[in-house]
């Protein structure tokens, strides 16, 4: 029995199976109606987001960057999805609509002040990519369309 | 009767009884070890034991039992004869009778593989904890690396990883505890017979890289002796700080005329640890393990095998720097099978014994984020084995051995990482000798190793470097000299040369490792570590009292460690980037330990450990993760032979010699109280160990705890262990 155990387990490494494909995301660019507003590349964040109190931004679109700085969109059929985290939801919140696509969203100004946000690229329940945080400023006269909370 | 009382021309036998020195009553369940072999057994209920086929000549017998002083005896074995000896062991005093001698090492021949520190019997039960690391913490030179209680691992003289080998019955455990602070040791101390810590030239028998030393956890999977009668033990332990409960069972049984069967198992459960600042979330643990061993034992040796299975699920607390907010759960399992055989010589070439062994281990562990998504997964298949020839003592040469060792590892990593699957082939030849001439004793060892590391892909990584085959080889060795200045005083020095090849993870790892709070990047261009270790030591012994002092200095070329770059990973900016570096290092320090009787009932004992590490290439920057000056001092009261009370203070000074991005740690002093009692009842020996850890519920933090900023060490905890020998 012992010899059978040895022989049977000889090739059975519990972690030796097909590796899932992981996205090679090393950065991102955030566009507001086609204009670049935030860029995260080579470990450096540039840009910030402004929105007015009780207003929502125009549609924001994320494009991920590979290690060479080239833009790409992950394949959702492989289980990739967009993720985010806002430090203080009393200041700003993210609103996503299915009709806008998986890589676009709006930011709502909930309260006056500043907070931060990170962008994630999720894959089958865990984050393949997590960015540095960038700032969101919510001001009384900031830009955006009036936000209708009935849409939520 | 299994054994005859006559033996071959070069062998004799020993039949003995262990008796109480004062009453002459027989003492059951005494652990009897023949120090210059790996043979040992427990006496039956009437104190009797029998060793067949001991090589003719002088042997040192060690007796270990609760409530009695650990005692050494020298016995002379005559060829073709059986020595019948009564051994008297005392509660404290040592008795001279017949061929017995006082238990002073200076008068004893140096046994092969004699441990520097040994935990067994009383001492083991008093300190028995959830992990090996916690059990032996505060011994001279020993600290504990932790990340929550479950993955704790010992650190010896500031050295960690595989520079401190942890073995089970002399074999590598096949786990990954040496590679990362979140990886636990796949050994549960509940079924441990004893723990031996070996340093100096003897470590060359086990590996070339153990500059810190070797911790050999003796479980005795494969029986090497056939007991006269069946016996065993049942134990349970409870702990209040984590609502923990552990159960253990072991039994050894003679079968037929030559077979010995051994079975053991344990089960452990614990919830989150309570600290004076609240509950440390995600620190629970569930562990189970079992083993079965069978041997055929004959006059000229034995052959046997064992199967074992180990499973554990434990938590890693949340990352204080935000990598994962709810912690990580790790599920680990290990199966192993081993074969051992010993043939005891009789050949004219002077061969005393030949040992062969082979073991296979299948290890796997998976790390799950709080969403139950798989973060990382590791698997290791390990085959290792070897042979060792021991030679008959001749003249000044007391012990000597020549052997070889081999290992094959199949390593795989899956999940969110880019570390390539890798195969590793290693081999070594070694020799060891111990000499005694008058007041001089010497030990010497020499070892040559080769290691071939072969990833399953050849490519270039911008962060790791070229990934492909790497080959390493090196020679290591050691020399230790001791001189007996007087009957009670010994002084000596040890010189070691160490070779250590980088590991697979150190070379090729790449990816986020949430459970270790790091984005890990290897360095495929690393060179081997090569080190010189020097030590001078002094020892005083008188009856049961002793004092040891040692000073050491280790100079390591290309010391390999994960260096915090202080930068965030571009891919996972929630994790700091740790890149494996190889830099020259110097480590120096001191250790001391003592035990002193005030009266026949009162004694004091203590330890002290200090190590300092610097990186000369970085302008003597302090090495990271070096423990501070620390120790323990205790007062022991033994009003009865079967009863012992201890009050002790564990302490450490502040650690302000820190590496970059480390934070300093304040000093502390923590009080513990414990008591031990043993009782003979209905032919069974009951032992009770009751302890109150951190009696004042003090808030304190240990420097090597990765989560010290999150929570302090556990608060006040009551621990009770009851073990029954039958």
Image: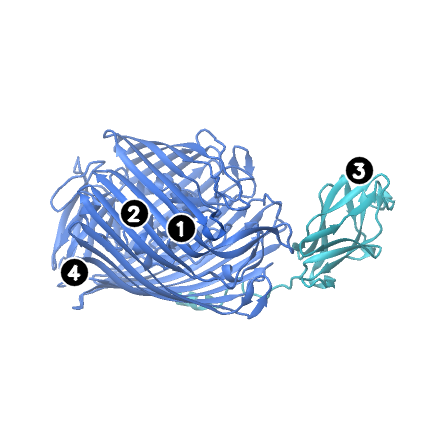
Chain colours: A cyan, B blue
Of badges 3 and 2, the one in the foreground is: 2
Mark 2, chain letter? B
Taking B75 as reference, is B492 left or right?
right
Determine the CA span between mark 3 and mark 1. Answer: 62 Å
* Mark 3 neighbour density, 10 Å: few (under 14) some (14–19) many (20 or more): some
Q: Residue at x 20, y 38 (%)?
A: B543
Q: Which residue is mark 3?
A: A112
Query: Do circles 3 and 2 both sit on a common chain?
Result: no
Of badges 1 and 2, the one in the foreground is: 2
- Above-or-below relation of B669 to B703: above
> Residue furthest toward the front?
B619
Q: Which residue is mark 1?
A: B265
Foreground of the two, B468 or A103: B468
* Mark 4 neighbour density, 10 Å: few (under 14) some (14–19) many (20 or more): few
Determine the CA span between mark 3 and mark 4. Answer: 89 Å
Q: Which residue is mark 2?
A: B536
Where residue B350 sits, quadrant-wise, is bottom left
Q: Which residue is mark 4?
A: B394
Tags 3 and 2 touching, CB below 8 Å: no
Point out the tag, 2 or 4, that comes first from the N-terminus.
Answer: 4
Determine the CA span between mark 3 and mark 2. Answer: 68 Å
């Amino acid at each position: 029995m012992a010899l059978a155990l040895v022989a049977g387990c000889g090739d059975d490494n519990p972690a030796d199976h097909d590796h899932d494909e992981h996205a090679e995301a090393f950065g991102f660019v955030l566009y507001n109606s086609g204009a670049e507003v935030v860029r995260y590349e080579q470990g450096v964040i540039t840009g910030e987001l402004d929105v007015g109190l009780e207003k929502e931004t125009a549609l924001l679109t994320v494009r991920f960057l590979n290690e060479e700085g080239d833009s790409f969109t992950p394949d959702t059929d492989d289980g990739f999805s967009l993720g985010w985290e806002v430090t203080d939801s009393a200041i700003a919140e993210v609103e996503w609509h299915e009709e806008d696509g998986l890589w676009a969203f709006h930011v709502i100004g909930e309260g006056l002040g500043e907070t931060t946000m990170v962008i994630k690229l999720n894959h089958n329940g865990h984050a393949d990519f997590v960015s540095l945080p960038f700032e969101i400023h919510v001001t009384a006269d900031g830009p955006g369309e009036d936000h209708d909370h009935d849409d939520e | 009767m299994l054994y005859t009382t006559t033996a071959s021309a070069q062998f004799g036998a020993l039949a003995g009884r262990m008796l109480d020195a004062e009453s002459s009553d027989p003492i059951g369940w005494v652990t009897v070890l023949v120090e210059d072999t790996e043979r040992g057994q427990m006496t039956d209920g009437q104190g009797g034991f029998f060793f067949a086929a001991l090589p003719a000549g002088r042997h040192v017998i060690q007796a270990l039992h609760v409530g009695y002083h650990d005692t050494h005896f020298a016995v002379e074995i005559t060829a073709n004869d059986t020595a019948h000896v009564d051994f008297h062991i005392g509660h404290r005093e040592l008795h001279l009778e017949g061929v017995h001698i006082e238990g002073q090492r200076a008068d004893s021949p140096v046994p092969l593989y004699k441990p520097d520190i040994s935990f067994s019997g009383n001492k083991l039960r008093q300190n028995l904890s959830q992990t090996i690391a916690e059990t032996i913490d505060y011994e001279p030179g020993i600290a504990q690396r932790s990340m929550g209680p479950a993955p704790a691992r010992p650190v010896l003289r500031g050295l960690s990883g595989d520079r401190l080998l942890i073995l089970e019955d002399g074999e590598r455990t096949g786990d990954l505890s040496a590679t990362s602070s979140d990886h636990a040791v796949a050994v549960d101390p509940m079924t441990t017979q004893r723990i031996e810590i070996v340093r100096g030239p003897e470590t060359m028998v086990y590996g070339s890289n153990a500059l810190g030393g070797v911790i050999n956890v003796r479980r005795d999977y494969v029986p090497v002796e056939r007991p006269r009668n069946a016996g065993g033990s049942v134990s349970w332990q409870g702990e209040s700080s984590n609502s923990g409960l552990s159960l253990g069972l072991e039994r050894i049984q003679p079968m037929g005329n030559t077979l010995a069967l051994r079975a053991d198992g344990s089960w452990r459960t614990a919830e989150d640890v309570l600290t004076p600042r609240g509950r440390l979330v995600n620190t629970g643990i569930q562990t189970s393990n079992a083993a079965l061993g069978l041997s055929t034992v004959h006059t000229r040796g034995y052959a046997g095998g064992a199967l074992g299975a180990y499973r554990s699920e434990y938590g890693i607390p949340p990352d204080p720097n935000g990598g994962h907010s709810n912690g990580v759960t790790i599920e680990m399992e290990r199966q192993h099978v081993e074969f051992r055989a010993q043939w005891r010589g009789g050949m004219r070439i002077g061969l005393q014994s030949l040992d062969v062994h082979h073991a296979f281990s299948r290890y796997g562990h998976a790390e799950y984020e709080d969403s139950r998504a798989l973060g990382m997964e590791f698997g290791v298949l390990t085959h290792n084995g070897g042979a060792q020839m021991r030679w008959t003592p001749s003249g000044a040469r007391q012990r000597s051995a020549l052997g070889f060792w081999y290992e094959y590892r199949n390593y795989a990593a899956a999940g969110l990482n880019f570390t390539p699957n890798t195969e590793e082939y290693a081999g070594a030849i070694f020799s060891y000798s111990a000499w005694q001439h008058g007041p001089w004793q010497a030990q010497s060892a020499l070892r040559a190793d080769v290691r071939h590391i072969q990833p399953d892909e050849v490519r270039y990584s911008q962060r790791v470097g070229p990934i492909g085959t790497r080959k390493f080889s090196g020679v290591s060795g050691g020399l230790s000299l001791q001189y007996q200045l007087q009957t009670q005083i010994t002084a000596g020095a040890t010189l070691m040369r160490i070779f250590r090849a980088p590991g697979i993870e150190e070379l090729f790892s790449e990816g986020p490792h949430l459970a270790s709070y790091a984005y890990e990047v290897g360095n495929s261009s690393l060179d081997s570590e090569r080190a010189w270790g020097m030590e001078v030591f002094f020892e005083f012994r008188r009856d049961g009292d002793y004092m040891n002092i040692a000073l050491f200095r280790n100079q390591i070329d290309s010391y390999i460690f994960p260096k915090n770059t202080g930068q965030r990973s571009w891919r996972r900016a929630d994790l700091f980037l740790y890149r494996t570096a190889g830099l020259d290092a110097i480590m120096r320090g001191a250790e001391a330990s003592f035990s002193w009787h005030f009266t026949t009932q009162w004694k004091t004992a203590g330890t002290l450990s200090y190590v300092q590490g610097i990186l000369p290439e970085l302008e003597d920057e302090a090495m990271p993760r070096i423990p501070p000056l620390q120790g323990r001092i205790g007062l022991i009261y033994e009003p009865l032979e079967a009863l012992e009370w201890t009050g002790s203070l564990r302490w450490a000074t502040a650690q302000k010699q820190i590496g970059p991005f480390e934070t300093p740690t304040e000093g502390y002093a923590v009080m513990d109280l414990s008591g031990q009692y043993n009782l003979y009842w209905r032919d069974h020996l009951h032992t009770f160990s009751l302890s109150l850890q951190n009696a004042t519920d003090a808030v304190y933090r240990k420097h090597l705890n990765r989560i010290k900023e999150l929570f302090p060490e556990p608060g006040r905890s009551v621990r009770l262990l009851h073990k029954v020998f039958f």
